[in-house]
Amino acid sequence: MSRTGVGCRVMIDGAQVDDGCIDWGSLGSWGAPWTLRRRNVATHTKGINAGLPAGAFIFGGTHPTCALDSDGVTYHCTLASAPAPEISDFQGSKQLIAIDQKIAGGCIGQDHAGMTWDCYIGEEAVRMEILTEDLLGQPELEPGRG
């Protein structure tokens, strides 16, 4: 894998992607959101898939499938089953993503039923106003509610 670039947007094997300014190697297999290093996109997407139910109770048992958009920053996620009915309308709802028990980003609901979500990692989640920068890297020992 070849990697070049400056800041959060990098080229990996000829594809421009955004790694959300996360050091994916400093903590376990994923990392903490304050420096830059990137694992391969396929491994990263698996982490996002697992990060939804690890970050928010509503995603438990939903089996998300996420794919990186061509913009290099947005992960489009589809759930195999409906999220927990904690709220009546998921469109615009903001939920956290946790990777290795650390808050790594968040998602925004794209439909009323909560079956599709756009997710962002690191600084992109802050830019999208899903969470504040001081939450990045904080412990998330169990999925959050509400």
Image: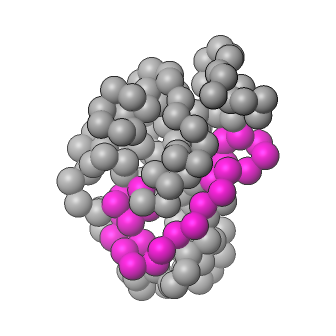
Say if residue 126 shows up in the picture.
Answer: no
Q: Nearer the viewer, residue 134 or 4?
A: 4
Coloration of the structure image:
one colour
> What residue is drawn where x is 53% and y is 29%?
38
Q: How many marks?
A: 0
Q: Is residue 43 left or right of residue 136?
A: right
- Indicate the quadrant where residue 71 lies: top right
Residue 82 image point, x, y percent: 51, 84
- Indicate the quadrant where residue 40 lies: top right
Quick one: quadrant of the C terminus?
Answer: bottom left
Asked if 75 appears above or below 34 in the picture, the reply is below
Say if residue 15 shows up in the picture.
Answer: yes
Residue lying furthest front: 1
> What residue is drawn where x is 27% and y is 48%?
101
Q: Is residue 64 left or right of residue 24?
A: right
Residue 137 image point, x, y percent: 33, 36
Residue 116 image point, x, y percent: 63, 71
Residue lying furthest left: 141
Which range of residues does the magenta coloring cover? 51-75
> What residue is drawn where x is 30% and y is 62%?
144
Asked if 136 appears above or below 80 in the picture, the reply is above
Q: Nearer the viewer, residue 123 or 30?
A: 30
> What residue is drawn where x is 71% and y is 40%?
72
Quick one: quadrant of the N terminus?
Answer: top right
Residue 28 image point, x, y percent: 30, 37
Asked if 17 appears above or below 114 in the picture, the reply is above
Magenta stretch: includes residue 85: no
